[in-house]
Every structure is written in structure tokens, then in C-alpha cells.
Image (cartoon, rainbow, N blue to C red):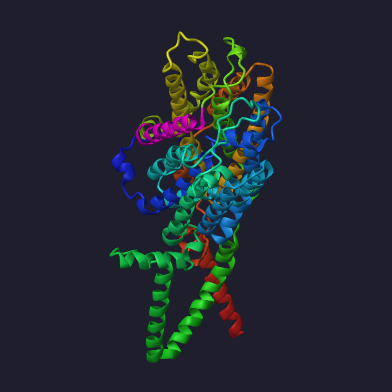
């Protein structure tokens, strides 16, 4: 349990760690936050250029619809992708997800209307269930408890790494060119040259948001190729099927001078050939004896297979029993932290990009508009906090996990959110244009401080709640529970942008721009309280008490010795009965 927490050194944690497969998973995981965060710097300007919002204050509402369409479709399909991965394997689902994300990004980048962009984001949610499958794969790769914290921390680490590159791509002046004309304020224009434009200039003018999405799609295709060639299947049954992608990857490694391991399908083929040769030799010595022995073996084993192994082979987990009270409690925590986290990520760029209105500000309760920052500044801010997140996961998270454990580390992390959300809107009063008493460097320092604190909370809290979710679920239900958790998270990501987008528009109309942030602070405060209803569990102890049923004949040793002895006693009785019947 949580009270029996043993401190491990980093060297002890790394012993036997599956580095190679985690590296391939990391490449796949990195490309997805790259796609997600690359939209943040320019989404406000993209919606503005679509001319869909009647007033500038309504842009946040339409931004919420875009985010919600992605999350709602993910909510509908995440469990289905998880169940499909239980049937056909994890790897193929990941590759489909990468392809679907790249396709939707290209469509999104070339969108000329809001509705095309909305359909593209919905398509991304439909075709991608990778996060839940990645969580399951990590749990199947890092089977030892000492490896799990480090393995699961790679997900937020890579999200933060993607958060560095993604906003830098989306906010690059060479890849993203919001139109200079503001339709809501015609006076705010900059003349564009009509003549002497190069192909690049004509392209970027017609499709101002396409190039950044093309670049991100290239990363996705690189990840897809790496996964096809080098990612090993982890599903307990599907991993024995021949993987032609891995065979091709092994051939490439051999050409480069590396020595890949022997694959399960090659090992089984060699075993079958050896067994066939041995059987032929034995048959030449005494075919009659062998035939009699084989008959005896079949007669003696058949009752055991029919009574015990057939039940194990056809056993399927009951999904109705997956949601225990501890699973529900952890999923609730996942929902809360995801709800306010995605709302922050979606609407902070909108708040920063909204036009600065000095006449609409009065400390502390009257806030209209935003900071008036440009796309490049917003991209730099998010990239910088992504760097901070990487350092936190690499340096701070291991110390928290070693010294506090999973549940206490999670409680510490979620206690940071309420303070940050409460203070963010008040930072607008430190702008030099509003109050000349503040130097111009004060506001950037405050913004970077708050975003760094929020990144600290997210980068340490997310892996902790993933671990709690992994350990709370029974082993045979983990893929399903992970997918269900992702559906609940997607539901939070769907409802959050809609509800808080409406609150942001309402707050702007009522000159209470702080409304959305203080409601988020209350929500995060409830999440902090709810964390004290959660407990940590030792999944190793659970597995010792309740071993997972065998999946095939090679797992017969998982059955108890006492049960096996009873079965063989039954076999002897049945044999005696058969012999007596034959005598009579």
C-alpha cells in the first residue's frame, strides 16, 4: 500500500529498464503533442480570419467549439479503439492513429472556412485513440513496479518536449502568416504588396496556416515509419504473430551492423522444425511404442484440458467488473485535472491574443479584452514553458516520486493549480500600457512565473495520476480501463472548452474577464480536496493474490498446485473407471 514506500536510487530504477522499446514509444508520443500544441499560437487569428464570429468577443466561443469537436469525437471512439487493440494488437492501432492525425492536420491547415476546420478537428478525434493504447503498452513493457514511475513519466515529459517545438512551429513567422487586416477593426491594417510575390509568398498568403501543419505532418510520418519498423507488439497473444515491419527493421539493423534479438515467431518456427526432426528419429526406432505413449498422453491430458485449460483459454474479462470504487475515484480525479488543464491550454492563448483595452480595465474586478500579444510572443511563451516542463520531469519529478511516493506527490501537484488560476487574470493590471509605474519587464516575468508553476503542477501531477489509474485497475482490465479513462478525459476536454468558452464570452460582455479563471480555480480546489479520497495500491501484491487466468497452454503453470493435484487425481479415477468398464 501507499504507506510501504521504499526509496530507490535512480540507478536502481534504471536496472533492467526497457530502454529500446521506450525510445520508439517516445518517438511516437512526441509527434502527437507536437500536433496538438502547434495550433495554440495561431488559433485565435485563424478563427478571426474565417470571419465566423460576429464580434471579436465571440472568437473564444468558436475556439471552444473547435477544441470540443476534437474531444467529443475522441470521447465517442477512444473505448472502441481500446477494445480493437485488445483484438488485433496495440501496434496497428498506433499506426492508424498517426496516419489519421497527419491526414486531419493537412486538411486543417488548408481549411478556407470555419466548418472545414471543424470537420478536420473532428476527424482527428475519430481516427486517434493513441494515448490510451500508449498507456497500456507502457504498462505491458514496464512490468516491474520500480520501472513504472519512470516509464509513465515519459508521457508528460514528451508532451512538454512537444510543447517546445509545437508552438515554435505554429508561431514561426516563416510558417504561419495571419492576415494583417483585422475585420473587427478596419483601421488596424498593414498594406500587402500585390506585385512581385514569390511562390512561397503567394502560397503563404492563400494558405497562411498550411505550412506549419505540413511540417508537423512530416514528424508524424517519421514516427509512423519508425513505429512500423522497430516497435514490437506487446499484446500477450498478438506479439507471437509475425510482424513484417519488424522483420524489415531487423534486416536494416543487420545491414548497419547491429544484432537484433530473435523474434518469437522465428523461435517458434525453429522449435517446430526441431520437434519434427526428433519425432521422425523416434519413429524410426519404435513407432509402435511411440504411438502407444502418445495415446496414453492424450488420454491422460484430455480431462485436464477439458475441465481446466478450456476454461482458461476461452476466458474473457468481464468489463462489468472493471469499475471498482478505487477505479472510479481515480477516473474522477482524471476528469477534474483534465477539465481545468485543457481549459487553461485552450484559453490562455486566446486571453493573451485578445485586443488590449485600457478603458475596459479597473483593478481588481473589471477586465475586458486581453494582453494584446502577437502570435510570435505567444509561441515563444509556450515553447519556454515546455522547456521548463522537460526540466521538471527530468529533475524534479524523480525526487518527488522517490521521497513522497505516488499519492502524496499527486496531492502536492494539484495544490498548485488553484493559486495559478486565481492569479493569471490579475497579471493584466501589471501591463506598462495600463500602469506606467510597472516596468515593461514585469508582466513577462509574471506570465513566465505563472506558466512555469502551472507546468510544474501538470508535469508532476499527470504521471502520478496515470500511475494511480494503472495500479487501481485489475491487470486483465487495464486496456479497457485506460480506454474508458481516455473517454472520460475526452469528455472533459469536450465540455470544458464549450462551457468555459461561453463563460469567457460572457465575462467579456460583463467586463468580468476574471470569471473563467476564478471558476477554474474553484474547480481545481475541489480536485485538490478529492485527491484525499484516493489511495495508492500495490499492483504486485494484487497479482500475487489473484493470478491472471492463463491465456494459452503455455501458461498452465499459473494454476495453483493444489488444483492441479486435484485434477490429476480425477484423471486417475477416470482411467481406473475406464479400465474396469473395458474388463467387464
Residue 390: in magenta span: yes
Q: Is residue 66 left or right of residue 568?
A: right
Foreground residue, 52 or 349?
Answer: 52
Residue 252: in magenta span: no
Q: Is residue 149 left or right of residue 547?
A: left
| Residue 61 point in image, percent of width and height | 67, 31
Which residue is most to the front? Answer: 195
| Residue 287 point in image, percent of width and height | 43, 90
- Whether residue 408 is visible here, answered yes or no, is no
- Point out the image quarter for the C terminus: bottom right
Foreground residue, 95 or 465?
Answer: 95
| Residue 495 point in image, percent of width and height | 66, 34
> From what the image shows, is residue 203 above or below residue 580?
above
> From what the image shows, is residue 527 above or below residue 197?
above
- Whether residue 400 is visible here, answered yes or no, is yes
Q: Main secondary structure of the magenta part?
A: helix
How many callouts does the rendering have?
0
> From what the image shows, is residue 28 above or below residue 157?
below
| Residue 96 point in image, percent of width and height | 55, 56
Query: What is the magenta range?
Result: 374-396
Foreground residue, 434 or 580?
Answer: 434
Which residue is most to the right? Answer: 54
Amino acid at each position: 500500500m501507499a504507506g510501504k514506500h521504499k526509496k530507490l536510487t535512480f540507478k536502481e530504477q534504471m536496472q533492467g529498464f526497457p530502454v529500446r522499446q521506450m525510445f520508439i514509444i517516445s518517438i511516437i508520443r512526441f509527434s502527437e503533442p507536437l500536433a496538438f500544441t502547434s495550433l495554440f499560437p495561431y488559433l485565435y487569428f485563424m478563427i478571426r480570419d474565417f470571419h465566423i464570429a460576429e464580434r471579436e468577443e465571440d472568437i473564444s466561443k468558436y475556439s471552444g467549439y473547435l477544441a470540443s469537436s476534437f474531444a467529443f469525437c475522441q470521447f465517442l471512439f477512444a473505448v472502441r479503439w481500446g477494445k480493437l487493440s485488445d483484438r488485433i494488437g496495440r501496434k496497428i492501432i498506433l499506426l492508424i492513429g498517426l496516419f489519421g492525425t497527419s491526414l486531419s492536420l493537412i486538411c486543417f491547415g488548408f481549411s478556407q472556412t470555419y466548418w472545414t476546420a471543424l470537420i478536420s478537428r473532428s476527424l482527428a478525434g475519430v481516427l486517434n485513440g493513441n494515448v490510451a493504447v500508449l498507456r497500456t503498452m507502457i504498462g505491458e513493457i514496464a512490468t516491474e513496479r520500480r520501472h513504472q514511475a519512470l516509464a509513465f513519466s515519459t508521457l508528460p515529459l514528451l508532451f512538454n518536449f512537444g510543447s517546445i517545438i509545437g508552438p515554435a512551429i505554429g508561431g514561426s513567422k516563416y510558417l504561419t502568416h495571419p492576415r494583417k487586416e483585422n475585420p473587427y477593426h478596419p483601421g488596424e491594417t498593414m498594406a500587402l504588396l500585390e506585385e512581385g510575390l514569390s511562390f512561397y509568398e503567394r502560397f503563404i498568403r492563400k494558405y497562411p496556416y498550411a505550412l506549419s501543419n505540413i511540417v508537423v505532418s512530416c514528424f508524424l510520418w517519421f514516427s509512423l515509419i519508425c513505429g512500423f519498423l522497430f516497435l514490437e507488439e506487446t499484446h500477450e497473444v498478438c506479439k507471437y504473430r509475425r510482424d513484417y515491419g519488424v522483420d524489415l527493421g531487423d534486416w536494416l539493423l543487420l545491414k548497419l551492423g547491429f544484432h537484433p534479438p530473435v523474434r518469437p515467431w522465428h523461435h517458434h518456427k525453429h522449435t517446430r522444425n526441431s520437434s519434427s526432426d526428433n519425432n521422425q528419429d523416434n519413429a524410426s526406432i519404435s513407432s509402435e511404442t511411440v504411438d502407444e505413449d502418445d495415446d496414453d498422453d492424450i488420454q491422460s491430458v484430455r480431462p485436464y484440458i477439458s475441465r481446466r485449460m478450456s476454461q482458461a483459454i476461452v476466458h474473457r474479462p468481464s468489463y462489468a467488473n472493471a469499475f471498482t470504487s478505487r477505479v472510479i475515484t481515480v477516473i474522477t480525479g482524471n476528469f477534474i485535472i483534465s477539465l481545468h488543464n485543457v481549459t487553461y491550454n485552450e484559453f490562455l492563448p486566446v486571453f493573451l491574443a485578445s485586443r488590449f483595452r485600457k478603458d475596459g480595465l479597473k483593478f481588481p474586478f473589471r477586465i475586458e479584452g486581453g494582453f494584446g500579444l502577437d502570435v510570435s510572443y505567444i509561441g515563444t511563451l509556450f515553447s519556454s514553458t515546455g522547456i521548463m516542463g522537460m526540466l521538471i520531469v527530468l529533475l524534479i519529478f524523480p525526487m518527488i516520486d522517490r521521497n513522497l511516493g505516488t499519492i502524496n506527490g499527486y496531492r502536492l501537484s494539484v495544490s498548485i493549480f488553484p493559486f495559478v488560476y486565481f492569479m493569471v487574470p490579475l497579471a493584466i493590471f501589471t501591463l506598462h500600457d495600463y500602469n506606467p509605474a510597472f516596468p515593461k519587464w514585469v508582466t513577462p516575468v509574471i506570465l513566465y512565473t505563472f506558466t512555469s508553476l502551472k507546468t510544474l503542477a501538470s508535469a508532476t501531477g499527470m504521471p502520478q495520476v496515470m500511475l494511480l489509474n494503472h495500479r487501481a485497475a485489475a491487470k486483465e482490465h487495464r486496456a479497457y480501463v485506460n480506454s474508458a479513462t481516455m473517454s472520460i478525459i475526452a469528455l472533459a476536454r469536450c465540455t470544458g472548452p464549450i462551457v468555459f468558452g461561453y463563460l469567457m464570452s460572457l465575462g467579456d460582455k460583463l467586463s468580468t474577464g476574471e470569471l473563467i479563471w476564478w471558476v477554474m480555480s474553484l474547480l481545481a480546489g475541489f480536485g485538490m480536496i478529492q485527491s484525499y479520497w484516493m489511495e495508492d495500491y500495490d499492483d504486485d501484491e494484487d497479482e500475487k493474490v489473484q493470478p491472471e487466468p492463463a491465456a494459452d497452454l503455455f501458461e498452465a503453470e499459473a494454476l495453483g498446485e493444489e488444483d492441479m493435484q486435484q485434477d490429476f487425481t480425477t484423471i486417475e479415477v477416470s482411467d481406473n473407471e475406464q479400465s474396469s468398464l473395458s474388463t467387464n
